[in-house]
Amino acid sequence: MAATCDKGFADSYMILNPEDAHFFDIIHVLFSRNIGHRKFVDSNAEGDVEGSFRGRWLIFISIVLQKFLLFISKPLAKFGSCVEMLVNLVALNGGITMIIINFLSGHLEIPDPKSHRYLSCIGNLDTRVKCDILKREDSKYYVSLAMMASKACYENEAYLKSTIAHEWRMEFVGFFDCWNEYQGRATTQILILLDKSKDRDTYVVAFRGTEPFDADAWCTDLDISWYGIPGVGRVHGGFMKALGLQKNLGWPNEIERDENLAPLAYYVVRDILRKCLSENPNAKFIVTGHSLGGALAILFPTIMFLHDEKLLIERLEGIYTFGQPRVGDERYAEYMKEKMKENCVRYCRFVYCNDIVPRLPYDDKDMLFKHFGICLFFNRRYELKILEEEPNKNYFSPWCVIPMVFNAILELIRSFTIAYKNGPHYREGWFLFFFRMVGLLIPGLPAHGPQDYINSTLLGSIERHFKED
C-alpha cells in the first residue's frame, strides 16, 4: 500500500489505492469535497484533491476502472493467451483449412510461446520484420528503426534474438523483465540492441508498451496518481513505478540490489549504457517506445537529468515516442524543454490521427497533465503536420464522434487498397482487418496499434525534420 510508504522524496503527492476502495467510499467521492480523508486517497496536496466535481469525477472513473481491471485480471490474461494461441495456430499452419488438413495428416504445428516463430497479439497485427526498407543514409532511418524496435519488444526473447541477428543484421544486447515494487511483480520489459556501421554505432533502448490483455499495464495507464519531484515537477505515479521508483527512497543515485532479483528498469538500462558507452567513445544511443513504452522512454532521460548523468546525457542523440500518453504537469514540461535544449537532445512525439492514448490523461483545468515537445501528427493519408498539440486533445468530445467514426470507415476501406497503392510491404492481414472493425465502435483504439505508426515513419514526408547533423 502506498499509504504505508515514506514519500519524503516527493514535495507533494496524490496517490490512489484502488485495492483499498470499497463501494460506499467510491460513491462518497462524488458527493464530498473532503476526499483526501478517504482511505484509498493518500495526499498532502489538499487543494488539488478537494477540487471541482469534475476533478472528483475523474478520480471516481480512474478508481472504478482500476477496480474492474483488477477483478478481471486473471480471466483477461487467460482469454488473451487463448486468443494469442489461436491466432498463432492459424498463422503457423497457413490458415483454418490447413489446420484441418494438417491435423488429419498428422502434421499439425502447435505454437510454442517461447519459440522465435511465436508472435504476440501486437505482432500479429503487423507481422512485418524487415528493417532494410530505408538505408542508413536516409534521414528517416533511425526514426523507422525506433518504431520497429518499439514494436519488436512486445515479443519474446527468442524472437528478438533471431530477428535482430538474422533479419536486421544488428547486435542483440539484452532483453530485461523488470520489477515494479508497487505491484510486486515484473511489469516492465526493455530491449537494447546495437546498430553498428562504419561511421557510427547506435544503441537503441526500447520500452515495451501496454499489452492488450495485461490488466496491470492498463491500470498503470489509467492511474492518475502523481508525485511532485523537487526541481522537476509533478509526474505520473504509475509510469514512475513502472520505471523503477523505489518505496521510501524514490530515485537514489545508486542502489544495491541482489543479482538474483529482477532488475529495476531505470537502473539496469543506465548501468548497461554506462558500461557500453565508456567502452565505445564513438557510440551514441536513442530511447524509444510505443504507448506506455513511450511514457517510459521520456521518463528515462528525466531521471538521467535529475541524477546529472553526464556521460549518458552527452551521448543521448534522440528520444522518439509513438502514441505516448501525457506524463507530467506544466512545470515538468518546462523542466524537460529546458534540459533538452541545454543538452541539444532531439525529442519527437509521433501521433497518428485519432489515436486515443496520446489524448490521455486529460489536459484541462481539473487535471495537471501536459504534453510538450514537437508533435508530429499524421492523418489517415499519412500526411504530416507539425503541431504543439494534437487535434481534439482530450478525445472525448461529442463534436468529434461522427468524424472519427467516418475516419474509421475510411481506414477499414484502406486496408484493401494500401498494398495496391504503396506496395506489398504495406499489405494488411485478416487479424488487423478485424481489429480495425473495432474502430467503428471505439474510434481511436485501432489507430493506437503499431501498424499506422510504422507506415507513418515510412510514408510520411518527415525528411526535412530528420536531416543528419
Image (spheres, rainbow, N blue to C red):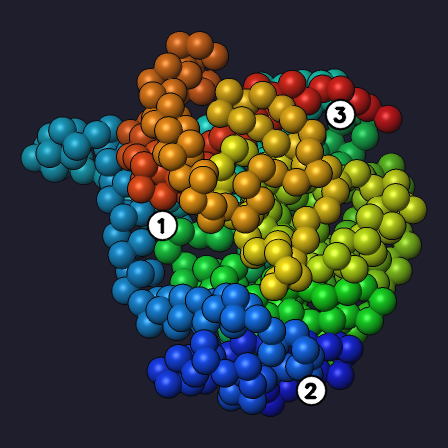
What whole-number distance in Å separates the C-alpha atoms at marks 3 and 2? 45 Å
**Can you say whether 140 is above or below 254 in the image?**
above
Q: Which mark is residue 318?
A: none
Residue pointed to by mark 1: 113
What whole-number distance in Å separates the C-alpha atoms at marks 2 and 1? 40 Å
Which quarter of the figure is the N terminus placed in?
Answer: bottom right
Q: Is residue 55 left or right of residue 159?
A: right
Residue pointed to by mark 3: 465
Mark 2: amino acid: Asp
**Can you say whether 97 is above or below 248 in the image?**
above
Is residue 382 shown to the viewer in this render? yes
Q: Nearer the viewer, residue 259 or 236?
A: 236
Q: Nearer the viewer, residue 18 or 86?
A: 18
Precedes in sequence: disc 2 or disc 1 = 2
**Can you say whether 60 is above or below 427 in the image?**
below
Residue pointed to by mark 2: 6
